[in-house]
Amino acid sequence: MLDGDEQAWRELIHRYGPSVRRCITAVTSRFRGVVSSDDEEEIFSTFCLRLLQNDRSKLAAFDAGRGASLGTWLGMVAIQTAYDLLRQRRREKNRDHRAPLEALVAGGPDPFDLYLHRERQDLARRLLDR
């Protein structure tokens, strides 16, 4: 796999793909109504990309000497990927809710800028009075 052998990649997906998908489903099942099967597919695709990106550095990081099997390790990576994607979605969703409010207040001058301008005028007036 580390050398970019396509057959090795196919074998990995064939052998561990179902258990990786079960790990993803275990995470997303806690968020039913929010996460669809399309989202689960996106998580699986992101998981695959994580394994391949940066010249397969994630795959190279696997160390069987640490006591975990390859299947267990892949499951942990899949779970982390699922939670990362769900956190990212939550941040994007929260950002989208703020956008309409920002549009409402953006129509007039910024209250802070108005206050700062008034403070500067008062300070200039007091200095000129001296």
Image: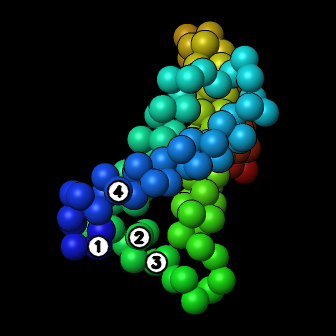
Identity, as a three-letter code, of the amino acid under mark 1: Leu
Residue 65 visible at all: yes
In which image quadrant can residue 4 be found? Answer: bottom left
Marks 3 and 1, how far apart in space?
Answer: 11 Å
In which image quadrant can residue 12 be found? Answer: bottom left
Q: Is residue 55 left or right of residue 99?
A: left
Residue 91's label in the rendered image is none
Identity, as a three-letter code, of the amino acid under mark 4: Glu
Q: Is residue 27 left or right of residue 110?
A: right
| Residue sitting nearer the eye, 34 or 68 | 68
Residue 114 visible at all: no
Q: Is residue 105 left or right of residue 10?
A: right
Q: Residue at x 64, y 25 (%)?
A: 35
Q: In what element is the residue under mark 1?
A: loop
Q: For mark 2, what is the residue?
A: 59
Question: 56 above or below 22?
Answer: below
Q: Residue at x 54, y 44 (%)?
A: 18
